[in-house]
Structures are given as C-alpha cells and as structure tokens.
Amino acid sequence: MATSKAVSEAPEFTSVKDLGYKQAGTSDTLSKQAAYALEHIVGFPKDVPSESKAELYAGYFMRYSENNPAKTYAVINGHYVLATDEHKANKSIEKIEAGLDYAFAITAQEFGKLKATEPEKHALIGGIRDKVQVYCSNKLGDLKRAASKLQNVGQSRTRDTIDFTVSVGKAFDAFEKSVKTKHGKGDTTAKPAHFKVAVAAFWKSYNMN
C-alpha cells in the first residue's frame, strides 16, 4: 500500500465560495458512489453481504494507508518510541514499521498473546487497529446514509427507469458472483452449476405467457 506521501494534507481553497464549490462536488461524488452501491450490492444499505463488505473494507484500508503511512518505532528497553534519525541510523537498535499492514498482518491469536508477553506492543498495535476499524465503520456509515437518502427521494432517476426484470437480472449477477466466491472458499452448499440451472429455470417459468 502507498506510504510515500499522505493525502490527508489540507486542500487549497481560494475563498469560501471555492470551498462551497468543492464541498458540493464531494457530496455529488458520494451520491454517485451510493447509487453504484445500490445497483451492485444486493440488499444495500439495509444488508451488506460479507463479500461486498470485505471488498469495501479493502478499499477503505487502501485509503487509510495513504492518509496514515507507517511510522518507525524504536524498541528501547522494551518500550516502543517513535524513532529519531539517530535511532534509524543505528542498526543495532530494533525497529518496526508500524502501520495498517503491520497491525493486521498479526493474527487474532498472536495479537491476544501480546497482551501478556509484550503489553506495550499490544497497546501500539491495538491502537492502530481500533483507529482503522472506526475509520472503516464511519466510511461504510457514510455510504449507507447516502444510499438511504437516495431511496427516500425515490432513488436516482436512472434507477426509476429500470424495470423489474433488469433489477432481478442484476440481483442474479450478484448472487452468481457470490456463489462462485463461496465455492472457491470451500463452501459445499455453494454450487455454481446448480445455481446456473436454477436461474435458467426461473426465467423459463417467469417468461411463460
């Protein structure tokens, strides 16, 4: 993930008018993102399938890492401190690059053990994990609220023109992706071939005069 330059620097505004223009653009973008979510995530915003949530969180992780590059910590007498240039130059000092990647590369079991064996490291990693989870939860909440707002005003004009069969087709497409993903993960109840036959049978029955 990118760690070269944080993108969280304050954007340049030339005036309050310019601020309003750019803020409106941000709002417009979120509305378009919410419309996409409504079209491609079955049950959204009330329900979020695990596969879709995982994909959203993967994107949120990328953005968080861009905004919050990993920091170098020096281990001094068992304590984790932000590394100075002196620390970084001293090869005999143990150091870690603590960021999102590092924090989530540790399994839940390993993380739990750290509380007893290395409490300071546990606190450091736990702090990063907590911030990331709050960030992701907030971003998903923003997307859900924007989607609900679209639904409350009759959804987007584009969605109003989509007939029932198109909506069902899109739902089947999403389910087809889900069944293939679950099958690939070893879910014995997920049967792509059977699903394909079932969908064909549905359309044959539905389209009968």
Image (tube, helix red, strand yellow):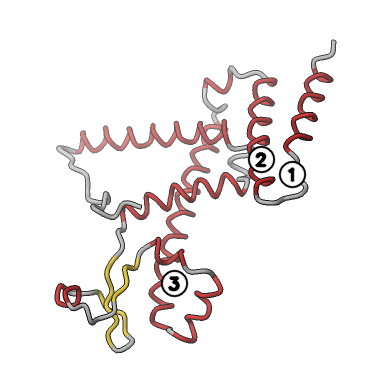
Residue farthest to the top, as pictured: 209
The residue identified by callout 3 is 126
Tag 1–tag 2 contact (CB < 8 Å) = yes
Question: Residue furthest toward the bottom?
Answer: 77
Residue annotated with mark 2: 180
Query: Within 10 angstroms of label 1, few (less than 14), some, or many (20 or more) residues?
Result: some
Task: Provide the secondary structure element on which disc 1 rests.
Answer: loop
Query: Which numbered disc flags the more N-terminal residue, 2 or 3?
Result: 3
Secondary structure beneath label 3: helix
Q: Is residue 53 left or right of residue 72?
A: right
Q: Nearer the viewer, residue 196 or 140?
A: 196
Amino acid type at image mark 2: Lys
Contact between labelled residues 3 and 2, with CB atoms less than 8 Å apart: no
Question: Which of label 1 and label 3 is nearer to you?
Answer: 1
* Residue 64 - label: none
Identify the residue under disc 1. 190
Amino acid type shown at disc 3: Gly
Q: Residue at x 66, y 40 (%)?
A: 180
Q: Nearer the viewer, mark 2 or mark 3?
A: 2
Above/below status of 187 relative to 201: below
User: Does label 1 or label 2 sit earlier along the sequence?
Assistant: 2
Q: How many marks?
A: 3
With 166 as the anchor, is 78 left or right in this view?
left
What is the crowding at mark 3: few (fewer than 14 residues within 10 Å), some, or many (at least 20)?
Answer: some
> In terms of depth relative to the viewer, which is nearer, 78 or 206?
78
- The residue at 79%/35% (across/down) is 194
> Residue 123, relative to residue 35: is it above or below?
below
Residue at left offset 18%, top offset 74% = 84
Mark sitting earlier along the chain (1/3): 3
Image point (38%, 36%), residue name: 27
